[in-house]
Amino acid sequence: MEGECRAPQARSSGLPAGGGGGESPGGDAPLPGSSGSSALLQAEVLDLDEDEDDLEVFSKDASLMDMNSFSPVMPTSPLSMINQVKFEDEPDLKDLFITVDEPESHVTTIETFITYRIITKTSRGEFDSSEFEVRRRYQDFLWLKERLEEAHPTLIIPPLPEKFIVKGMVERFNDDFIETRRKALHKFLNRIADHPTLTFNEDFKVFLTAQAWELSSHKKQGPGLLSRMGQTVRAVALSMRGVKSRPEEFMEMNNFIEIFSQKINLIDKISQRIYKEEREYFDEMKEYGPIHILWSASEEDLADTLKGVASCIDRCCKATEKRMSGLSEALLPVVHEYVLYSEMLMGVMKRRDQIQAELDSKVEALTSKKADTDLLTEEIGKLEDKVECANNALKADWERWKQNMQNDIKSAFTDMAEENIHSYEQVLG
Amino acid sequence: MEQALPDPERRLQPATLEPLGHPDAGLESAVGEEAEGARDEGPGDGTMMENNFWLKKIEISVSEAEKRTGRNAMNMQETYTAYLIETRSVEHIDGQSVLTDSLWRRYSEFELLRNYLLVYYPHIVVPPLPEKRAEFVWHKLSADNMDPDFVERRRIGLENFLLRVASHPILCRDKIFYLFLTQEGNWKETVNETGFQLKADSRLKALNATFRVKNPDKRFTELKHYSDELQSVISHLLRVRARVADRLYGVYKVHGNYGRVFSEWSAIEKEMGDGLQSAGHHMDVYASSIDDILEDEEHYADQLKEYLFYAEALRAVCRKHELMQYDLEMAAQDLASKKQQCEELATGTVRTFSLKGMTTKLFGQETPEQREARIKVLEEQINEGEQQLKSKNQEGREFVKNAWADIERFKEQKNHDLKEALISYAVMQISMCKKGIQVWTNAKECFSKM
């Protein structure tokens, strides 16, 4: 099985410290807590020395990777993050607990909207206190997501629930919709918290801790609208060129994503359909049982048998109800989340392609123009690093995501199977 | 196989309508024989009686169905289904069965037989035929009469009908029934020659009687209510069951889609692949298991349908009683009014309005001779009327007694059959659950290996 942190190994030659491999000059960058003991922690953890190489690269081009001006000088390489976490805490220890609850409706003259209460409990040093309580609305979540995407274009950001579901919705704010959304938002924040890189993102911290007015002013800072638009335009222009040479592994990845997206969408549809059919079955069964009771009223000898059948049918009904709620609480949300994930993944692939395209265009410019070669070469150098980072980040995250996906899908379906078994047993009992 | 007229030794005669009250033929003797038959005690498919057609144990089966084309009464081409009826007699000693008769009949001939039985045995709850057209269908079932599944279920229903008639202590002895099983050609003519259609009570007469009867036997009124309730509850149940079956079919079949998608998905997965693939297989198994389950349920539905139609047969007996009772009441009323007329004439008082009275007043009294003549006529009529009333009363009582005996028999049969049907339905459900558990346990195992 592919370890999640293997990817950067492709770059370095695997030689101990000082060994070449990769474009960056070797050197010792201060890595907090670096010692040989880290290597013993987990099989998946890479050699420290290789991280130093990475670190060099990253710290050199921090400005490219990290567009968040508020970020502390912290390496954003996923690997170093993992190592850091593993040093300071025991492995797999969560130190950030988030809950989303208490949806509340706010009515103003212009609009009506819902806010959700977010409670954060943490033991991390960089947080001013150990407990925070804030209120956020959907727009704020959108903002956070966009910021994360900007900061980490090739990391797999968890998906947000949809803005609103067009079909079958009478009003935006019916209870089921709000509850579903609340659960999805809760999951969204927790997935970010569990992500080795994203969890340390500064915007994320602000989101969790700032008061309303603080958040608004924070939002206003950061790359302005115009510059963002400029980036988008460039991105579109680049994507028009198409990707000439996508590395093999990304071709595979792309292929996988396409097929996966297809299949998961189908599964989403199938699961919804099953829910609908079970609901209709339940409705009919509700009528079925009482008929037997009615009949038993006009019979003498048959009355007991009829009543027995009626009570069995009732048990069937209850079992079906339980099955349905199991579906809607466990399987359907998970499947739907991965539908959104698959869309997200396509976006990630595009962005990765864009970064590469940028590089490719500059390389082309170099070979054709031959003018300003020095500047171009430097730019190309930077871009190559950028591409490198992007790819590695993606690869690392990809493995992690796949693992998660596997686990999630597996447990979702296993639970469903479990539910079905229970429901049949209940009817038999 | 054509058979000659039955052996004169065999006491088979259609119980005719008129001599119902007569002691020597028909009902009384039938009752006597019935008592003997009951004592003789045999298994369901044929009574054993000396001097009886059912000398040995017989087996009746409707073994095949065949599509045929022919020309109907209007000389137009039509397609219909013919059913093969085989009768076997089972020798007591070695238990082997010998085919004694086999012929083909179509549904309309069964109907003819039943209508005949209804007319000649109005006090019997005559077993119903399977439905003429498919009702209570859910989307997968076809409403087409030519559909092979429908034909198969009808074949079973027709066999059931014949077995029920053959196991009825009275009906089994009917000559026309015997001929139905043994005389292929000419049977229709024979039935029609009995002239039973003429003897049938008109619907209108029956309806009239139902409304106007003053003093029907309370038990029959209750029975009528019961049969109404039974009919309404069973048809409601069948309707909902059909809808439930439809929905259940949907749930199971949609899971089949999982099978396909899982299989396609497994192609791109390395670790999850095997688990997905085998789980998908189990989903397919699950989806296809519903076909057998629902086929069995259809059989259960047919059992309920039989009793749905039996309710109508019950009502027919009640109607006959009401008709007879009404007849009786009318006759009694008629007699009473004639007696009164006579009295008035004799005493010369006019208490009731009569046309004669009016004309007498207007045109003068009649002569004593005229009056005497009229009184005499009336007295004759009154005598006749009293005789008739007496015999009608007796008829009525006989009818009630015999009908009620058969109704008791029917009740026992119904309770027994329905109980069995309900229990077998429960068993079906249990087996369905067990299958479900198995499939999902397997699927769960596959999922956990992903």
Image: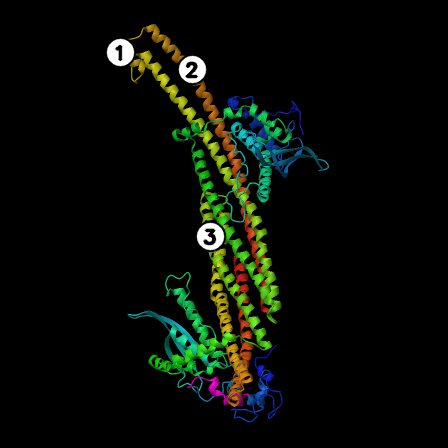
- The image's colouring method is rainbow
Q: Is residue A61 magenta?
A: yes
Tag 1 secondary structure = helix
Chain that bears disc 2: B
Query: Which residue is the site of mark 2?
Result: B383
Find numbered disc 3 in the image and state the secondary structure of the residue it sits on: helix
Q: Which residue is mark 3?
A: A284
Q: Position of residue A185 (x, y in %)?
A: 43, 72
| Left or right: residue B386 compared with residue B420 | left
Q: Quadrant of the N terminus of chain B?
A: top right
Mark 1 lies on residue: B362
Q: Secondary structure at mark 2?
A: helix
Between the C-alphas of marks 1 and 2, the distance is 31 Å
Q: Position of residue A24 (x, y in %)?
A: 56, 90
* Residue stretch in magenta: A54-70
The answer to whether marks 3 and 2 mark residues whose Cβ atoms lie closer than 8 Å is: no
